[in-house]
Structures are given as C-alpha cells and as structure tokens.
Amino acid sequence: MRDDDAREDDSISRFNGEDLMQKLRGKSFMFVGDSLSNNQWQSLACMLHAAVPNSNYTFDRTRNRSVLSFPEFEFTVTFLKNGFLVDLVVEEAGRVLKLDSLSRSYQWKGVDFLIFNSYHWWIHTGSLQTWDYFQVGDKIYKETDHMEAYKIALTTWGNWIDSNIDPAMTKVFFQGISAVHYHGKDWNEPMVQDCSGQTKPIEGSNYPGDRYPGEAVVKNVLSNMTKSVYLLDIALLTQLRKDGHPSRYANGETDCSHWCVAGVPDAWNELLYTILLQK
C-alpha cells in the first residue's frame, strides 16, 4: 500500500489533460463508488474536456453508469455507481447488505485504472440508512457496528483485488475519506451551524476536529493486501476546505458533504495525475 505522500518529492504536477490522454492513449479509467466518487469523476471529465474543448467526445449515461470517451485518444472515463462495493439486495425479509458478496465485480475487469470509493453510506442511520440487515455467509444480523461491517466489506473487496487484478495490467487506487462540514464546533466555530456562508479554508495545516473512523479501517485493509493499491489520502485536505461545498446552492438543500466543481475534487485529480506521471 502506498499513499499520495509517497511521492518522490512534495510537488504536485500541474494538470495537463491533453498530455494525460496522449501518454495514456488507448487506456480506460473507471471510478467505482458513491456520490463522492461521482464528484471526482465529474471533476476529471470537466478537466479533460477543458483541455481539448473541440474534441468530438461521446457521452453515454444509464441509471448507474456514466461514460465519457475521447475517440481521437481512444481514452475513456467511466463512473459506476456502487456505494457499498459489496451487494445490497432486496429479499423477502427486507434490504440485505451482503458483506461477503461481490456479484457485480465482473464490471471492474479489463479496465486499466480503477479508482474505488466507499464510506459515507456506511455511516448512515435512521431514515438515511439504505439497508435493514447485514449478512455474512448464512448469518443475518439486524444490527452490528457499522465500522466493523465496513471492514468486513472492504476486506471482501481487497480479497477480490488480490485474486483478480494483475498489477502489470491494471493500476488500482482507493479514494480516501472525504470530509463533511455540518457542525461548526468541529473547526472551533461553535456558533456556526454548517458550511453555509463559509468563504475561506481553515488556516494552517491542522484540523481541530476528530479524524474519521473509516480512515483507520481503510489503511488497515490496504496494508494487509498482497496487491499494490494507491491511497489518495484526501481526509485532511478536505477537512480544511469548509468553504468548498455547494452549501445552499445544491438543489434547494444545504449540502456540506459534496464539493463544487470546479473546486476541491480537482486537487484529488491533480494528486492522481502526479502519481500517474511517475508510473
């Protein structure tokens, strides 16, 4: 396992979309995950199009898949919605989250660069929770610790990567934990309700609030894998950007978990670009 701070130096390369597609001509990228994964895909799609605005690109979208292609470079960038990575199925008993099942993983094969993401759906509770039961093997649980469930699911994903991915053919990345800003007390502004009206990042490089429990889970799973997965460790980077959310301009609802494009996700793609230049 390596992360973004494993670069040979501390500099981040200026993103050059045309250069990326020229150097990786004929290659395919796929982002697999939840809406934060879609956020990064949207950012990269915009950055690439801005680099070649006259390109005769093609765009195709279905319910769970968005595909942007640049035929002159034979270059494709796909987003595949799969917020848990493991299977969520509707059965007679209700919605069952199967922590050891990956029935849709065939869609990940044959891609040159895979960027996975999964976290925010795991911390949902109450009406936001999209499952009724957990299942591991033949055992079904009404409730269990969500981070324990997350670790089991990521381990299932990690085992699939170890068994099915040839690093000489496919490079795998994991998008780290993206911050939310719904409570001003987290950044020492207890009178602030959320990210609304925030116009400046937090000064310095230290975040006064807590780290996310998912960070330790991700790093533990990646460290126990036999295949190399590159972690885009964006947690602190995003915690400092309380000003980067759509806020009240997100379809009438205050959104302090996703990010404006252009904006914070562009930095994630600059990190990705910097790593790719070293390959």
Image: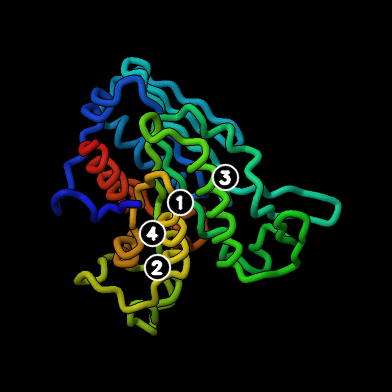
Disc 1 or 3, which lies upstream in sequence? 1
Return the residue at label 2: 196
Q: Nearer the viewer, residue 52 or 233?
A: 233
Q: Residue furthest top?
A: 72
- The amino acid beneath tag 4 is His
Classify 143 as above or below 47.
below
Disc 3 or 4, which lies upstream in sequence? 3
Q: Are marks 2 and 3 in contact (CB under 8 Å)?
A: no
Q: From mark 3 to mark 4, how far is it between C-alphas?
A: 22 Å
Q: From mark 1 to mark 3, how far is it between C-alphas?
A: 11 Å
Is 35 placed left or right of 131 in the picture? Answer: left
Q: Are marks 1 and 3 in contact (CB under 8 Å)?
A: no
Q: Indicate the position of residue 239 as horizontal and vertical percent values.
A: 34, 66
Secondary structure of the residue carrying tag 4 is loop
Return the residue at label 4: 245
Disc 2 or 4, which lies upstream in sequence? 2
* Disc 3 crowd, CA 10 A, few/some/many (<14, 14-19, 20+): many
Disc 1 or 2, which lies upstream in sequence? 1
Secondary structure of the residue carrying tag 1 is helix
| Of marks 2 and 3, the one in the foreground | 3
Q: Nearer the viewer, residue 248 or 133?
A: 133
Q: From mark 1 to mark 4, how far is it between C-alphas?
A: 12 Å
Return the residue at label 1: 36
Q: Which mark is residue 82?
A: 3
